[in-house]
Image (cartoon, rainbow, N blue to C red):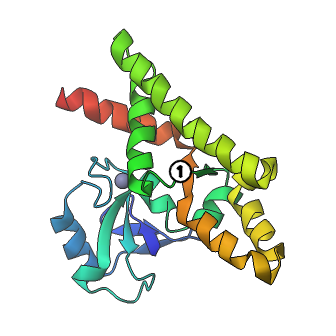
């Protein structure tokens, strides 16, 4: 998968941070796509992007396009997410990436909620994600929770370890860091307040 970030309907910011105009056919698709993430189902707010499902940004076929929130976009660039300090890795085969994104977002938005019940739920969710991070660290060492370092570790393993790494990749997930999404959290909170 690859993606374009689209702060507005007319321009997007590519992976290198350059702002370019959104091509007309894509702009029409975006106008129709609305503002709900195709992966986790949450409202994207202004932080949304197009993910090309087959990883080919030239394939603008409607079936190849998906609108993604800021968290689900990360899955398209796991190593970049690690280098930029946006996420850690966790061993969570029981959850899909979109479910983790949904849980993380709920936990962030509920964390300072005045209702004790919701606050406890947020704390439980955070603890569950933390356990996944700890499980990976236990298996591959502390450094493995940083995606770029895990990629190096995997590359340095011998041929015989390939099967093991394949299995590890199956259960490997990105746990987004709240500190990297402060602006998004603010906007999502405003969005929720507006809907309430
Ligand atoms: Zn999403």
Q: Residue furthest left?
A: 32
Question: Mark 1 sits on what residue?
Answer: 92
Horizontal arrangement in the rendering, residue 36 relative to residue 13 (left or right): left
For the residue pair 5 and 171, the one nearer the viewer reads as 171
Picture quarter containing residue 186? top left
Q: Image point 40% across, 89% down: which residue?
A: 58
Number of residue marks = 1
Q: Image point 41% across, 18% down: which residue?
A: 119
Residue 32 visible, this angle: yes
Horizontal and vertical percent position of residue 8: 34, 60
Horizontal and vertical percent position of residue 64: 30, 81
Residue 179 visible, this angle: no
Q: Which quarter of the figure is the C terminus placed in?
A: top left
Q: Image point 45% across, 39% down: which residue?
A: 104
For the residue pair 32 and 39, the one nearer the viewer reads as 39
Horizontal and vertical percent position of residue 187: 38, 37
Q: Secondary structure at mark 1?
A: loop
Q: Residue furthest bottom?
A: 58
Horizontal arrangement in the rendering, residue 100 relative to residue 85 (left or right): left
Horizontal and vertical percent position of residue 148: 73, 63
Horizontal arrangement in the rendering, residue 139 relative to residue 73 (left or right): right
Whether label 1 lies within 8 Å of ligand 1 gets the answer no
For the residue pair 174 and 10, the one nearer the viewer reads as 174
Q: Is residue 27 above or below residue 46?
A: below
Label 1 neighbour load within 10 Å: few <14, some 14-19, many 20+: many
């Amino acid at each position: 998968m690859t993606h374009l970030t689209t702060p507005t309907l007319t321009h997007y910011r590519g992976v290198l941070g350059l702002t370019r105009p959104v091509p007309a056919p894509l702009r029409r698709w975006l106008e129709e796509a609305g503002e709900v993430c195709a992966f986790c189902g949450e409202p994207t707010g202004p932080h949304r992007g197009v993910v090309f499902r087959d990883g080919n940004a030239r394939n603008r076929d409607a079936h190849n396009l998906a609108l993604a929130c800021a968290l689900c976009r990360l899955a398209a660039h796991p190593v970049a997410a690690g280098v930029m300090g946006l996420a850690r890795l966790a061993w969570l085969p029981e959850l899909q990436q979109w479910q983790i994104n949904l849980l993380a977002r709920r936990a962030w938005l509920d964390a300072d909620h005045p209702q004790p019940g919701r606050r406890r739920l947020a704390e439980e969710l955070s603890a569950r994600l933390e356990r996944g991070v700890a499980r990976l660290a236990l298996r591959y060492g502390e450094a493995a929770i940083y995606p770029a370092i895990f990629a190096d570790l995997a590359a340095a393993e011998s041929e015989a370890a390939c099967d093991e790494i394949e299995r590890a990749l199956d259960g490997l997930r990105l746990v987004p860091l709240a500190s990297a999404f402060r602006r998004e959290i603010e906007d999502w909170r405003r969005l929720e307040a507006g809907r309430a």
